[in-house]
Image (cartoon, rainbow, N blue to C red):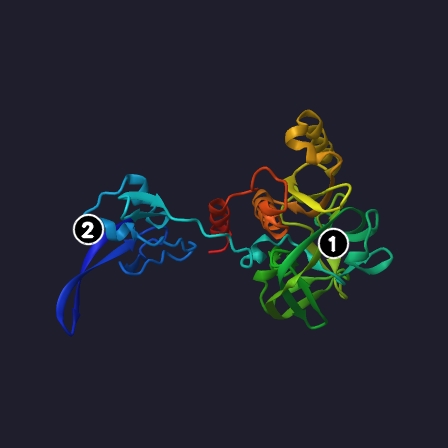
Amino acid sequence: MGYIIAVEAFGIKGSHQEYYWVDVGKLGDKAIVKSDDDQTIPPGNQQREIPEGGMSIEKRVVQGGEPPHHVRKNPDKYYYELESRQYKRRPEPVPDFSTGGEQRAIPCFPRETLVATTDGSIPIELLTIGTTVLTFDEVVQATLDKPITIIHQNKTVRLVDITTERETISATTRHRFWIEDKKQWIPAQYLEIGMLLKTVFGEVSEVTKIVIQEVVEQDTYNLTIADSHNYFVGNTGLLVHNTDELPRGKVYIGRDPQTKAIIYVGQTKLDLDTRESYHHNDAVKESDKYGFKKNMKLESVMDGLTDDEMDYHERRIYDEYGGKAKLKNLQVPMGDEKINDLKKKYCP
């Protein structure tokens, strides 16, 4: 919601009135006041430029114009075109996938993170399904041996370096650690100096330093454990939760069976074999439309994703592999406006 207000301004040429747009939204008592000449929009929104020959809705209202209700309600999405005398939508900015990567990071650990197994500590990237790891039963308060049922491989651009008196371990921002003195799971990004982490030996290890850092995009890993939701990592075996939510879906690529070129990007909550068979059936039923899917081979790029994460990464990967110019998707996975709105939800 916004208002046009007049403010008495004073300068070397005397006083005069200047008009300002006051945006009162989800900021409670804090309003954003800006000059009519300033076409920027409130923090949290990505700038939509006004094309040449256009006028901001704020300025049009000051001049006596009467925009439709939907235009008044969303002045940052519209402008007034002087030549046609019509209200039009501002061009949507192309989504910037270089920011906010940490908000899409599935709770995971980087390569070389040690995991406590019945055969000793093993780097997480070397683990296989069926490997027996040590896990903690919170009900009986005992350490148990349980097999790995799923290994998740993902990506991240931000890590939290957690230093204790014995070691430094890295995790994605949302990976939860058991804090013994608080008796609760806390995400890595919210850990504080002095907190006590539970170890596989039944002892505690005090946090002495926390550093959150941007990193070059790298592989990360996470585990699903049978009948359990935790395991131990690092030299001292720190107790961590295996995920913040149950895995929901994955983003995949499709390759041409002959050239091996990537021709398709999609998302699914099905297993890849089932999804692949559906694509092949499409090619049989409507060969003129989906013939390119015949024998197309699918490969998982990221899994264990929430719905929002699937939407975000599907579009990011679609753009990364060439978008409309190179891929055969009949539709863009998610449009610019929806992706930008999705980013605002997580990356204010």
* Residue that appears at 64% across and 58% down: 156
Q: Looking at the image, which is closer to me, 100 or 150?
A: 100
> Seen in the image, is 277 located left or right of residue 67?
right
> Seen in the image, is 83 located left or right of residue 265?
left
Query: In this picture, is 203 found above or below 343?
Result: below
Picture coordinates of residue 251 (x, y %)? Answer: 65, 44
Disc 1 marks a residue whose amino acid type is Tyr
Q: Looking at the image, which is closer to me, 200 or 268?
A: 268
Disc 2 marks a residue whose amino acid type is Gln
Determine the secondary structure under disc 1: strand
Q: CA distance from mark 2 to mark 1?
A: 65 Å
Earlier-in-chain disc, 2 versus 1: 2
Q: Can I make out residue 1 in this image?
A: no
Residue 63 image label: 2
Q: Can I make out residue 292 in this image?
A: yes
Residue 3 image label: none
- Disc 2 residue crowd, few under 14, some 14–19, many 20+, Cα 10 Å: few
Determine the secondary structure under disc 2: loop
Picture coordinates of residue 319 (x, y %)? Answer: 59, 50
Residue tagged 1: 231
